[in-house]
Image: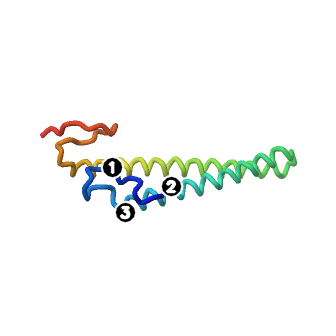
Amino acid sequence: MDGNTFSGLGNGNTTQLDNKVLQTFQRSFVQVQNILDQNRLLINEINQNHESKIPDNLSRNVGLIRELNNNIRRVVDLYADLSTSFSKSMDASSEGDSSGLKLDKAGHKRNRIG
């Protein structure tokens, strides 16, 4: 992932998403991609076992499908964590915005009250 991917976010000053946040995002996206690659292999093996109709292979599919389901749960959790981290980063970045505006949860700017 390019280090400048999120450089347009924030107020253009030092409140841009810092390297630590970007590294966290990159690490999470790499984890997700690795799990999705593993899922592709699992699905291929499940399909081959199913097509073979060999009882041992069909029995093996039970465990492979469980592993696939667990991997999907892990991906969902990683995306949820990413969403939370991104929201927190955007909140922190908008707090330093000197324009008197703050991003709401939908990413739209709104006037600060108080």
Residue 69 appears left or right of 55: left
Q: Nearer the viewer, mark 1 or mark 2?
A: 1
The answer to whether the residues at label 1 and label 3 have Cβ atoms under 8 Å apart is no
In percent of width and height, residue 17 lies at: 33, 56
Local SS, label 3: helix
Query: Which residue is found at the position 60% from the left and 50% from the top?
Result: 70
- In the rendered image, which residue does mark 2 sit on? 29
Numbered circle sitting on residue 19: 3
Snapshot quadrant of residue 103: top left
- In the rendered image, which residue does mark 1 sit on? 9
Q: Nearer the viewer, mark 2 or mark 3?
A: 3
Amino acid beneath label 2: Phe
Q: Tell me: residue 111, above or below residue 13.
A: above
Snapshot quadrant of residue 32: bottom right
Mark 3 Cα within 10 Å, few/some/many (few <14, many 20+)? few
Residue 80 appears left or right of 56: left
Mark 2 Cα within 10 Å, few/some/many (few <14, many 20+)? some
The answer to whether the residues at label 2 and label 3 have Cβ atoms under 8 Å apart is no
In percent of width and height, residue 6 lies at: 38, 53
Amino acid beneath label 3: Asn
